[in-house]
Image (tube, helix red, strand yellow):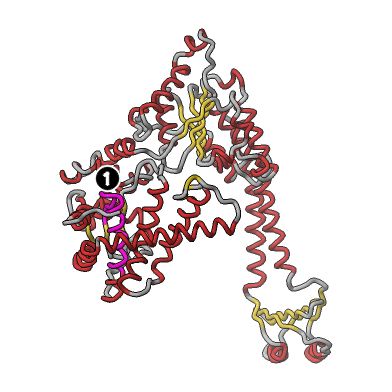
Amino acid sequence: MNQSKKTVSKKFFPLFAAFIIVIAGIIWFVQSTTNQVSIPFSSVEKIIQEQNGKTVTITEQSDGSLFIKAGKSEYVSQVPPNSQMVDKLVEKYNIKYSFSSSSRYGKWIMAGVLLLLGGAVYAVQKSKGGIGLGNSMKNSVAKAQPLPNISLKDVGGLGDEMKEEILQTLTTLKDKERALKLGIKPPKGILLYGPPGTGKTLLAQAIAHELNASFFSASGSAFNELFVGVGASRVRSLFQAARKQRPAVIFIDEVDALAGRRKAHGGEEGEKTLTELLVQLDGGHSNDGILFIAATNRKDMLDEAFLRPGRIDFSFHVPLPDTKGRREIIDIHSKGKAIAKDVLTSLDGLAESTSGFSGAELFSLFESASRHAVRNGRDMIQKQDLDYALDRTILGSTSRPLQDHETKRRVAIHEAGHALVASVTKPGSVRKATIIPRGEALGYVAPIPKELNLSTTSDLLDRVAMILAGGTAERMFLGEHSIGVSGDVQQAKHIIEQMVETGMLQDGFTLTFSKPDKEIKMQELFAKGIEKAEKLIESHQEQYLQLVDALLKKETLEGHEVEEIICANMNVAG
């Protein structure tokens, strides 16, 4: 017990000493300057005269500063260059005079030195892993964390095949004896990689739960440190703590911050930390009962030495969920929430409408819908709450409705063009059309995205025509288009560039290599997109004008309403 107290006191003493030095310096500096009143040199003689023969002390410094002590008061002034007035005052009033070669800024310099000294002592303590932020971070990294009661079966969106593959991998850890008889070495490390928000952390927790293991978690950035040796020390502490609580899972999220390619990693300290991680992963029998799991969004940034077998034995891609996976995640996040029956029966449609959403975004979607229901005084989530949350997630917050009639009509003409061409070329592809501003858009047509985007040349041309249909409709019915088409033009340009780069042209699988030829092909595709949009709007002009009127009247049309207008007495023309 006494030894422990001595150790703690040794750690605290340098920091305590630095603290005392800095505080003492600040007190001294403040006390020495607080009572000084700055006066012009012309007022010095008046101050002396007011003392009526009492003792006055003057101290002159080499930089021309003049300090006057008259009774309990202290004054500071500045002597004009080449002035002999101080000597005359000393003789005339019999003043005590002294001269100092130090500067009036000496106290500032001393205070700065004291602060630097205190900071240096603190930095040394931190680099040694003593009292300070470095030590607290080390302790937090090297501490087992409580696990949620979740198994692999409870993780939505992964797919049965991936779950089965992970379970097979874990079997060698659960049944080590059988694995060794078959000559199978238990895995040391697993890498989970994929887009953000796909549940990599949750998956790591589920793996730890399956193994009934202690769970140590840290971010890769927690090991990055300015001071020498701190990052490597944290890595060692983490593995040492895990070895004391086997079986254990060590999980490092954003591992690219710790195990990035060495040339791109930057800094000698970062390389030392990575080297220490590699050494710990090569720990041999000392790592028995420990599974290392790393997660990243940037697998391409990881160092090859880190990825080699024996350190990372299995890599699992955790992709964005497909329709089935999103439906599983939606079921998980809708549990325990008060949801209207008609919404519950339409969750399959929600899963289809959220292609490209991660699990985290689906969670946020239901949270946003719940808040919207509460704000509007509802006791359960209605369809309009989910629609609001979906639009807000994709496009941002709503703005004030358009008041100017001409602007409102132009936006309706524009959005009706998008909606008509989309519905004619891909029936059932529109989820909503609206002229209510949201985010930076004055209006928008929300599509129902395709799950697999293996588009053909015809598909992409239809897409270009749909994108350009808004501006095309403006020119057809208003004579010219507005600046509002700028976003459409950029989208169309991006698709057209991809088509030319991959040889997706109507005259065959043809590649163009020179820049002038590429520009010509792009202009041709752009013109074809506009031409197709014009033809479709002309051949379905009655339905198009009905769409414009409906948007002006209702402001928002659901997908089925758009389809009803388009399909009424329509002979589909290509």
Position of 61 relative to 88 (above/below): above
Q: Quadrant of residue 545?
A: bottom left
Depth check: 304 or 501 in front? 501
Position of 153 relative to 48 (above/below): above
Reply yes or no: does residue 25 show up in magenta: no
The residue sitting at 52% across, 18% down in the picture is 186
| Start-end of magenta stretch | 411-432
Q: Dot 1 corresponds to which residue? A: 350
Q: Is residue 167 left or right of residue 546?
A: right
Depth check: 290 or 27 in front? 290
How many numbered circles are shown? 1
Looking at the picture, how far across and down is residue 343, in whole percent? 19, 45
Q: Amino acid at mark 1?
A: Leu
The answer to whether residue 358 is visible is yes
Quarter of the image that includes the C terminus: bottom left
Q: Quadrant of residue 355?
A: top left
The answer to whether residue 384 is visible is no
Reply yes or no: does residue 417 show up in magenta: yes
Looking at the picture, how far across and down is residue 521, in whole percent? 51, 56
Q: Secondary structure at mark 1?
A: helix
Looking at the picture, how far across and down is residue 274, in whole percent? 64, 36
